[in-house]
Image (cartoon, rainbow, N blue to C red):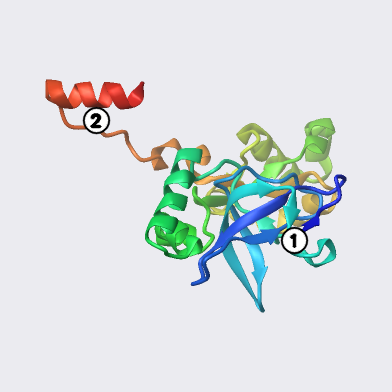
Amino acid sequence: MSRIPETSVAILKIAVNVPLSRAFDYLAPDGVSPPAPGCRVRVPFGTRQQTGVLIAHAGESDIAPDRVRRCTAVLDEEPLLRAADLELLRFTSTYYHHPIGEVVAAALPALLRQGKPLDPLVETIGATDLACSVDVEALAKRAPRQAELLEALGDAGGIGITAEELTERLPNWRRTATALFDKGLIERLEVRATDFDESLRPPGVPGPELNPEQQAAVDRLRS
């Protein structure tokens, strides 16, 4: 068994949705810290890119160190599956003699299996830190439309404004924005839809009322 040098990042054991009864060894992407187990990653698999789930870290691999490939991207900041979830999935794979990658994939909704984000992303236009140093009043004297756009984006804060909303407020903003992009005063951002608009968050729904025996069971499980 080949041990990865101590200076290298840990081996990532990735469950890929293929009919093979094993996890596959990868390294984290260049410059990226190894994600936590339960996170999804995009990996090169044969001639294609596949979405897999990190199920464990390891310090060694059966593959020669120079042949361990790197993940293309880490798709989640936080694990989608908890340690207890991963343990249950490993048990299920072993008990039913079914490939771990297919078992893990079956635990995720179809869009997550396809590598889609857990939270939908919204593209916005926002002001950069450099914009804070601009004298908007002076800019307004020589480029009033640039000043108007920059002021609107500055007032919106760090999450910016969507292109659709900007078009409603400033119909010709795209032509004006070109100069501000070139100066590094504004930028395109991707923010989670739920951060941008709280109304998009699914409402909390209370569960059914429990009888005493059910409540006792829930309390025991929680403890």
Q: Residue 70 placed where, x, y %?
A: 75, 61
What's the residue at 78%, 52% (across, down)?
A: 181
Q: Choose mark 2 or mark 1, whichever is in front.
A: 1
Mark 1 lies on a secondary structure that is loop
- Where 36 falls versus 132 (above or below)? below
In the image: residue 58, left or right of residue 7: left
Amino acid under label 1? Answer: Arg
Q: Residue 53 placed where, x, y %?
A: 56, 55
Q: Residue 126 placed where, x, y %?
A: 68, 43
Q: Are marks 2 and 1 in contact (CB under 8 Å)?
A: no
* Quadrant of image for the C terminus: top left
- Residue farthest to the front? 1
The residue pinned by badge 1 equals 70
What's the residue at 79%, 37% (across, down)?
A: 131
Which sits in the foreground, 153 or 17? 17
In the image: residue 174, left or right of residue 6: left
Compute the Cα span from label 2 to label 1.
43 Å
In the image: residue 188, left or right of residue 38: right
Mark earlier in primary sequence (2, 1): 1
What's the residue at 66%, 47% (across, down)?
A: 57
Q: Residue 158 placed where, x, y %?
A: 65, 35
Residue 186 visible within the image: yes
The residue pinned by badge 2 equals 206
Q: Quadrant of residue 150?
A: top right
Which sits in the foreground, 193 or 13? 13
Mark 2 lies on a secondary structure that is loop
- Where 64 falls versus 82 (above or below)? below
What's the residue at 79%, 31% (across, down)?
A: 132
